[in-house]
Image (cartoon, rainbow, N blue to C red):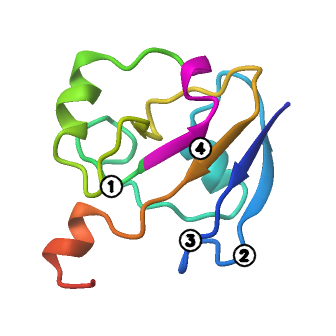
Amino acid sequence: MTQIIVLPHIELCPEGTVIEASPGTSICDALIENGIEIEHACEKSCACTTCHVVVREGFDTLNEAREEEEDLLDRAWGLEPLSRLSCQALVGQTPLVIDIPRYTINMAREGKH
């Protein structure tokens, strides 16, 4: 099992947490399986950016992003060089530290900021 440290998020995980995930599991699935209800509007099909996360540590150990994911990330709210779509980023053997952005593009459109 690989450790994932989830930094505090005001709504989804106010105090932050540490979870475990099997290598090969997507970050999105690991979060959901551990009660962190990250938004995933396209049902994890790499068709939106609502599951966007920033991988603060361990980014280079993730599977490489496909062109489809890279194109979508350009539309993500709060994009950073260490951004990934959590539905596409697969956990490896190395511990990760992830930050879930405060907003998603859906929230910004709905005026929830």
Specify few, some or many for label 2: CA neighbours under 10 Å numbering under 14, 14-19, or 20 or more: few
Which residue is disc 4 drawn over? Answer: 29
Specify few, some or many for label 4: CA neighbours under 10 Å numbering under 14, 14-19, or 20 or more: some
Q: What SS does tag 2 mark? A: loop
Image coords of residue 67 (percent x, y): 23, 17
Q: Residue furthest bottom?
A: 112
Q: Amino acid at mark 3?
A: His
Segment tinted magenta in the rendering: 53-62
Q: What SS does tag 3 mark? A: loop
Q: Residue furthest right?
A: 1
How far apart are the two marked residues, 1 and 4, measured between alpha carbons? 14 Å
Q: As drawn, is 94 to the left or to the right of 85?
A: right
Image coords of residue 14 (percent x, y): 65, 78
Question: Mark 2 and 4 residues: CB-CB less than 8 Å, in contact?
Answer: no
Q: Quadrant of the C terminus?
A: bottom left
How far apart are the two marked residues, 3 and 1, measured between alpha carbons? 15 Å
Q: Quadrant of the N terminus?
A: top right
Which residue is disc 3 drawn over? Answer: 9
How far apart are the two marked residues, 3 and 4, measured between alpha carbons? 17 Å
How far apart are the two marked residues, 2 and 1, measured between alpha carbons? 21 Å
- Dot in front, 3 or 1: 3
Between 15 and 68, the one lying in front of the other is 15
Q: Earlier in the sequence, mark 3 or mark 1?
A: 3
Image coords of residue 20 (percent x, y): 81, 43
Q: Amino acid at mark 2?
A: Glu
Vertical relation: 106 (above or below) 81: below
Which residue is disc 2 drawn over? Answer: 15
Which residue is disc 1 drawn over? Answer: 50
